[in-house]
Image (cartoon, rainbow, N blue to C red):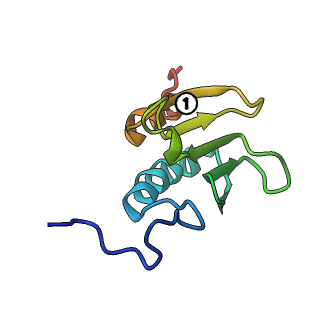
Amino acid sequence: MNAQPPSPFPGRAPEQIAFHRTELGVILSLYGRMVAAGEWRDYGISHLRDVAVFSVFRRTAEHPLYRIEKRPKLRLKQGQYSVIGLDGQILKRGNDLKTVLRVLERKLIRAVD
């Protein structure tokens, strides 16, 4: 039995890569906690041919602090999810989104004076 619905265009790749509802739930959960902590203020989502990108901003009119990318073509190599910093450095990469996002959750942990 086939678990996936039949494609309207058999043999063709999808026109865009997009985040699934469960993936967005995980990302938006982290986003909500970071907004509540005052770290992040805005986000943007891009769905392109090869990659889906969730960009996080401190202010609307600046470059993204972090980009959370989904590249399904890399799932058998380095992992389809990655977190990229402001300078373009890859902070974490892997196939489990929750594990990859842990690098950003560390920003929530602060010493209390």
**Looking at the picture, how far across and down is residue 5, in whole percent?**
30, 73
Q: In which quarter of the image is the N terminus?
A: bottom left
Three-letter amino acid code at the position of disc 1? Lys
Near-viewer residue (48 or 43): 48
Q: Give the vertical position of 37 relative to 48 (above or below).
A: above
Helix, strand or loop under label 1: helix
In the displayed structure, does residue 59 sit left or right of residue 106?
Answer: right
Near-viewer residue (110 or 89): 89
Q: Which residue lies furthest to the right in this view?
A: 61
In the displayed structure, does residue 100 sit left or right of residue 34?
Answer: left
**Looking at the picture, how far across and down is residue 60, in whole percent?**
79, 57
Residue topped by disc 1: 107
In the displayed structure, does residue 30 sit left or right of residue 60?
Answer: left
Q: Which residue is drawn at 53% across and 20% down?
A: 113
**Looking at the picture, how far across and down is residue 100, in whole percent?**
46, 34
Quadrant assignment, res 88: top right
**Looking at the picture, how far across and down is residue 71, in whole percent?**
55, 46
Q: Give the vertical position of 103 relative to 24 (above or below).
A: above
Q: Which residue is drawn at 44% across and 39% down?
A: 75
Q: Residue furthest bottom?
A: 8
Quadrant assignment, res 3: bottom left
Q: Residue at x 66, y 50 (%)?
A: 55
Mark 1 surroundings: few (<14), some (14-19) or many (≥20) residues within 10 A: few
Near-viewer residue (98 or 17): 17
Q: Give the vertical position of 51 relative to 67 (above or below).
A: below
Q: Residue at x 61, y 51 (%)?
A: 51
